[in-house]
Image: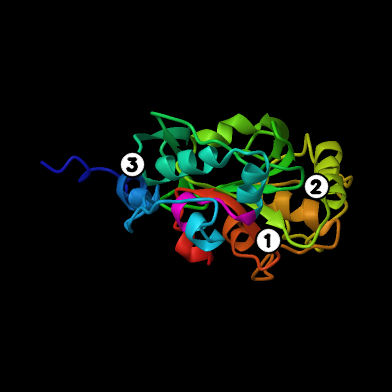
Amino acid sequence: MNLLSNKPKWFKRTFSVLISVVLIAIILLVANYVAQRFIAHNNAHFVPNYQKVTLTEETDYETIFLQTGLSKSAVDKLIKNDRFDEVLKAQEFFFEKHETECNALFDWFTREDRLTDDFITFYDLQPGDILVTLSTHSLGWRHGHAAVVIDEFNTVESIMMGVDSSKENSDYWTGYTNFAVLRVKGKTAEERKAVADFAKEKLVGKPYSLLSGFGIKKAPDCESKNFSLHCSYLAWYAWNNFGVDLDSDGGRLATTYDILHSDKVEIVQLYGLNPNDFI
């Protein structure tokens, strides 16, 4: 017996719409689960597939970078302080395959990949540097996360919807499955510190919005009533305030990829990303 046969037409139409909505919701949830569980994890953590070589203090910088993820500035700092053994430790960690897990930030919609068996060491973290990771993903899209470094131990970040931007501990970054430390080229330590101070003093306590940068002005006054941030926009805005545009494609949306591939930054250190992509 058809249970809807004696119902009015409006009821049948409403019932049909509800069933359709439920089916679409189920399909979207399943698609999101598959995208988050399988597709997003395809590039969670790069482990070198090339040969590990013996490093010495005379090894060229490009080889050391490919073997450790450390650039010239980080290597020079370690050698100057008689700590070349730290370069060799970085090489060991860079080539090891580590245990990871996928943790929820916003249930299955937004998640992040984390190391579970060890932590990375920062070798040259300075005020004004930018931290970028591609470990964060939503709906299968690995959009990543970004932060501005205040000092060796602290960052300014806009973490997620519903949470105001805040000062955070940089130690949290040492557990991501991948990251890069970026430094704006051609700027003195004093200039970079000025950017860090600006981020700390002016960009903390601002609401989160994915639409940041889409107003009349891409960079409105940070003291204006409706000013908001998201993670990569925060990093872009901080440096743009000092005349450096890190948005490599020039669009309204300043993404982690835009900053990571900007010709105005150099890699200081990376982990879990393929260094060949940045040579």
The reply to whether the C-beta atoms of the residues labelled 3 and 2 are less than 8 Å apart is no
Which range is magenta?
66-72
Residue 107 visible in the snapshot:
no
Q: Earlier in the sequence, mark 3 or mark 1?
A: 3
Cα–Cα gap, marks 2 and 1: 26 Å
Q: Residue at the left extreme?
A: 1
Q: Rounded to the nearest whole Å, what is the CA distance between mark 3 and mark 2?
A: 42 Å
176 and 204: which one is in front?
176
Tell me the CA gap for discs 3 and 1: 28 Å
Q: Quadrant of residue 214?
A: bottom right
Q: Nearer the viewer, residue 170 or 232?
A: 170
Q: Which mark is residue 227?
A: 2
Question: Horizontally, is 103 left or right of 124 in the view?
Answer: left
The image quadrant where one finds the N terminus is top left
Q: How crowded is the residue under tag 3: few (<14 C-alpha within 10 Å), some, or many (20+)?
A: few
Specify the quadrant of the image occupied by residue 167. top right
Which residue is more in the foreground, 157 or 61? 61
- What SS does tag 2 mark? loop
- x and y percentages locating residue 270 in the rendered image: 53, 50
Point out residue 94 in the picture as x, y percentages from the top left corner.
Answer: 43, 45
Q: Which mark is residue 265?
A: 1
Q: What residue is shown with label 3?
A: 97
Looking at the image, which is closer to me, 261 or 78?
Answer: 78
The percent coordinates of residue 112 (x first, y second) are 46, 39
